[in-house]
């Protein structure tokens, strides 16, 4: 079953470890998408007691 969501992983740049996964609706683009991802990034940083600047996100691509 195909979903209309984009999947992202949030990575600690100091360790290279993925620390959180998140999905957003595929209809979000540009500034809306960036705003959602920045908000999640801030929450992940707070929950993991990390500086926001050490976390980045990547889209998870389906390799099938």
Image (cartoon, rainbow, N blue to C red):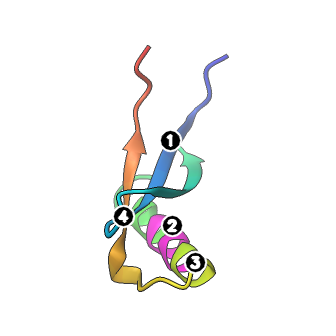
Q: CA distance from mark 4 to mark 1?
A: 24 Å
Give residue 59's position: percent from left, percent from top. Answer: 39, 45
Mark 4, residue position: 15
Query: What residue lies at 33% left-to-right and 81% top-to-bottom?
Result: 53
Mark 1, residue position: 6
Q: Secondary structure at mark 2?
A: helix
- Label 3: few (<14), some or many (≥20) within 10 Å? few
Q: Could you tell me how many numbered marks the image carries?
A: 4
The N terminus: image quadrant:
top right
- Label 2: few (<14), some or many (≥20) within 10 Å? few
Residue 38 is covered by the magenta coloring: yes
Up the image or down, 2 lies above or below 19; here it is above
Mark 3, residue position: 48
- Label 1: few (<14), some or many (≥20) within 10 Å? some
Is residue 27 in sight in this rendering?
no
Most extreme residue toward the right is 1
Query: What residue lies at 58% left-to-right and 33% top-to-bottom?
Result: 4
Disc on res. 36: 2
Up the image or down, 40 lies above or below 59; here it is below
- Label 4: few (<14), some or many (≥20) within 10 Å? few
Q: Earlier in the sequence, mark 3 or mark 2?
A: 2
Q: CA distance from mark 4 to mark 3?
A: 13 Å
**Span highlighted in magenta in the image:** 36-42
Apparent side of residue 43 relative to residue 62 in the rendered image (left or right)? right
- Of tags 3 and 2, which is closer to the observer? 3
Q: CA distance from mark 3 to mark 2?
A: 18 Å
Q: Secondary structure at mark 1?
A: strand
Query: What residue lies at 58% left-to-right and 53% top-to-bottom?
Result: 22
Q: CA distance from mark 3 to mark 1?
A: 23 Å
Q: Earlier in the sequence, mark 4 or mark 3?
A: 4
């Amino acid at each position: 079953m195909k979903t209309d969501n984009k999947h992202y992983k949030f990575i600690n740049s100091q360790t290279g470890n993925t620390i959180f996964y998140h999905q957003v609706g595929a209809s979000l683009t540009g500034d809306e998408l960036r705003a959602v991802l920045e908000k999640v990034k801030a929450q992940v940083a707070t929950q993991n007691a990390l500086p926001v600047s050490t976390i980045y996100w990547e889209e998870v691509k389906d390799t099938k």
